[in-house]
Amino acid sequence: MDFKDIELQICPHCGGDGILEDENGWCCYVTCMDCGAHTAQVDYHTPDERLDAAKRAATLWNIGKVVSSHPGE
């Protein structure tokens, strides 16, 4: 399984598309390509932990646990 096999729901804030990101080999997170809402960064320490971190970030996204910088948030 690779990142492309991880299903992401629409953004819980705006309904836009999310993208799963890998930040320079130390964490994964999901961010909305439209409004910029994002999950927390899920750290990993070895290449073997990378896919698990990606799945955990996707789970956070899919249940709506995201951060947004919109006024009133």
Image (tube, grey):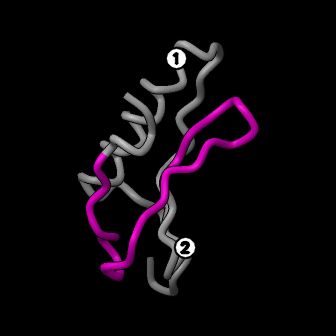
Type of amino acid at the residue the image marks with label 1? Glu
Type of amino acid at the residue the image marks with label 2? Gly
Neighbours of disc 2 within 10 Å: few (<14), some (14-19), many (20+): some
45 horizontally vs 50: left or right: right
Residue in the image at 51% along x and 86% along y: 71
Residue 4, relative to residue 61: is it above or below? above
Q: Which of 24 and 73 is in front in this view?
A: 24
Position of the N terminus, as image quadrant, is top left
For label 1, the residue is 49
Residue in the image at 51% along x and 83% along y: 70
Q: Residue 36 carries which label?
A: 2
Place residue 23 in its image quadrant: top right
> What residue range appears in magenta?
7-29
Q: Is residue 43 magenta?
A: no
Residue 5 picture location, percent across and down: 34, 41
The answer to which of marks 1 and 2 sits earlier in the sequence is: 2
Q: Does the magenta stretch include residue 17?
A: yes
Residue 61 picture location, percent across and down: 35, 53
Q: What element carries label 1?
A: helix
Neighbours of disc 1 within 10 Å: few (<14), some (14-19), many (20+): few
Residue in the image at 39% along x and 71% along y: 17
Q: What element carries label 2?
A: loop
Residue 48 picture location, percent across and down: 54, 13
Dominant SS in magenta: loop
